Image: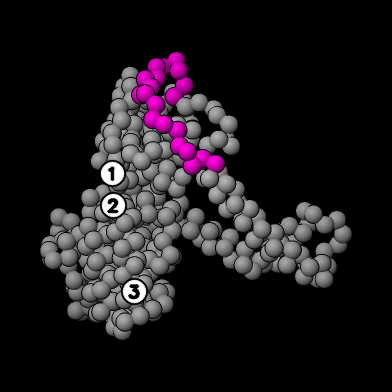
Amino acid sequence: MDFFEKLTSLSAKVRLQGPAIKTEEATKNAFVMPFINSVLGYDVFDPLEVTPEFICDIGTKKGEKIDYAIMKDGDVQILIECKKIGEPLNINHASQLFRYFHVTNARISILTNGQVYKFFTDLDAPNKMDEKPFLELDLLDIDEYSVPELVKLTKSAFDVESIINAAGELKFVSQIKKVIASQFSKPEDDFVKFFASRVYDGIITQKVREQFYELTRKSLVQFLNEQINDRLKSAISGAVQPTMSAPHTPDAETPVETDEPQEKILTTLEEIEGYHIVRAICRSAVDAKRIVQRDTQSYFGVLLDDNNRKPICRLHFNRSQKYIGIFDQDKNEERHALESLDEIYNFSEQLKKTISFYE
């Protein structure tokens, strides 16, 4: 199974067995250990890799235990604190994580109840765990955009610097999405007033504000539905995907990507996920802001500096067999078959080397 299939398999298990779980210990055995082992890829039966009931004496507090510590070369990499499934996860439940985070080498900590996983680091102050998570995962409502970031926590792809570099953006994007979601369901006065002032010429009285509250809410819902319908129409009209073309060898004078009518281009979630994986890999070589996507009808391109003559790779996902196209110093493209998006990580060194050609 690929990474996403492992996640959805565990999700199905949580949905089916969750109501029968009554204790924290049962939660750990049924859900948390499979998450560590199957999803993240760490051996829960190797105490040198996953240490349960991890003890770290802190000042006058002796013998306190954290539920799991994921280790590498004897150093703590990730701390995990567990609660019973169904229990709310708030910062008050993370007191031990705060203490242990400060006295270990861990840069990542996880608070979970087996269904919801909250990931923390130390963006606000060095060696002090943030109060707000940079990433949240709900196994019963998986956000596909969080999957590429979660992959970076797996044993095979673990890169703490890449995770930390991405955490700041993730943290604020997550919070902004929550604000947007809340405005869609229950718009605040300032939000309503903002839109009312753009379309209503009169004085915005309390009565007008009340009227525009419902108008704003309806407009947001209709806008969202229209966006979904447009996406579905595009997917239906683009159901017949273009056939695989012969490999193209660009030269220094020929743009790698071409400007095409946007209405003919359908960007898929898999392409976005693949792009984020490439971006996560390459951010250790260049600033992430320099890594830009450019979709075309035939392939999904990833460029450096949004420059047609600086291709990093191509994602050929418009067919049943997926490929990643890697470029050499002469900009010759070599395609490699992918069985899953996780396999993009196998080309980390080649992708970084391609960037070095342009620096």
Q: Residue 216 placed where, x, y %?
A: 71, 62
Q: Residue 20 placed where, x, y %?
A: 31, 82
Q: How is the image coloured?
A: one colour
Quadrant holding the C terminus: top left
Residue 241 vertical position relative to residue 105 in the rendered view, above or below: above
Q: Amino acid at mark 3?
A: Leu
Tell me how far mark 1 sits from mark 2, CA to CA. 8 Å
Other-residue count near label 2 (Cα within 10 Å), few / some / many at <14 / 14–19 / ≥20 = few
**Residue 93 location, quadrant:** bottom left
Return the residue found at the far right: 202
Q: Which mark is residue 284?
A: none
Return the residue found at the far front: 240
Residue position marked by numbered label 2 in the rendering? 2
Is residue 24 inside the magenta stretch? Answer: no
Q: Amino acid at mark 1?
A: Glu
- Name the N-terminal-most of marks 3 and 1: 3
Most foreground residue, 351 or 27 = 27
Q: Which mark is residue 339?
A: 1
Residue position marked by numbered label 3 in the rendering? 16
- Name the N-terminal-most of marks 1 and 2: 2
Label 3 residue SS: helix
Tell me how far mark 3 sits from mark 2, CA to CA. 21 Å
